[in-house]
Image (tube, grey):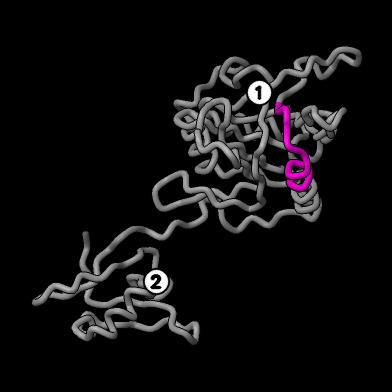
Amino acid sequence: MPKYEEASYLNDQNEWERVSYLELTNEERRADLRERDLREKPQGFFQLGIRNHPKTPHFFEKKPIRTDLQAGIKESEEHSNQQRMICAFLNKYEKHNLGYYERPWDKHDKGFEPLVKIRNYKWEKEVKFGLVYGKYVVFDIFGRDEKNLSLTDKSPFIAIEVVDTHFHSQKAFKVLLETSKNLPLVVGYMFLPVTPHFNSVKKPARTNSFSSVRFQCYIADGSFWYRNERLEELYEVTPEIPEVYYNLVKEKLYEDGYIRSES
């Protein structure tokens, strides 16, 4: 690990203060510094630790500070309103049936098909989730089983992305595909321009029954899905070439009116 003769931290006045390795010989100063968030430079990207070697005390690199994989996105007011509503809905009811209409065009028998039926999940907004070394993704809504710590296909991590005018960056999309292949993770999309025709939430018919959370598109098992078909089953693309795969997904979503252009 790299060694450093100098470190920086935010002091009690919320200002960046530099400290030399020479100060590590003082026991009280060393104890204070161990409680600080030490970086390699002001506003640095690496967390540092202290090694109090008798002859060569120094700071060492512990780990990178995770940063947002797709920072700087400004969402619409409608996005924020729907995000709050959906999260409140999910926390209000104990049991949820997440799925899709097999035949959304059929007025008489749309055929709701479940992806997963869950209960006792805890849901929160703006959840930071470390998916790749040094980076994290911020999910609009994220839920996990509150009572069962097992992570299986029956109790997966579930993220819900509310989409109005922005979609994932290519890097974030690639990471989500890879993560969903390696972990039980479902990322469902609520596309506001096609709500409630293609995606919606519906309260339980009875107090002891399941609510329905309907998606048209979602990520699972390493693929982007339209209802019960992987994208690579519909078009000649593969997740193994992520740039082409992502470009087709984004192109189709805009073309079909799932994402609204910024005004």
Q: Is residue 89 magenta?
A: yes
Q: How many marks?
A: 2
Q: Is residue 137 magenta?
A: no
What mark, if any, has residue 30 been given in the picture?
Answer: none
Q: Residue furthest left?
A: 55
Judge from the rendering whether residue 19 lies leftward or rightward of residue 14; answer left or right: left
Residue at position x 43%, y 72% from top?
43
Secondary element under disc 2, as helix, strand or loop, is loop
Answer above or below: position of 134 versus 131: below
Answer above or below: position of 33 versus 118: below
Snapshot quadrant of residue 208? top right
Residue type at mark 1?
Leu
Snapshot quadrant of residue 52? bottom left
Q: Position of residue 55 (x, y in %)?
A: 8, 77
Judge from the rendering whether residue 156 lies leftward or rightward of residue 207; answer left or right: left
Q: Position of residue 246 (x, y in %)?
A: 56, 33
Question: Which one is in front, 88 or 20?
Answer: 88
Q: Position of residue 254 (x, y in %)?
A: 72, 35
Q: Can I make out residue 223 in this image?
A: no
Q: Can I make out residue 13 in this image?
A: yes
Residue at position x 76%, y 49% from top?
79
Residue wearing tag 1:
115
Report the span colored magenta: 87-98
Residue at position x 24%, y 66% from top?
60
Residue wearing tag 2:
37
Answer above or below: position of 102 versus 151: above
Snapshot quadrant of residue 11? bottom left
Between the residue at mark 1 and the residue at mark 2, the CA separation in whole angstroms equals 43 Å
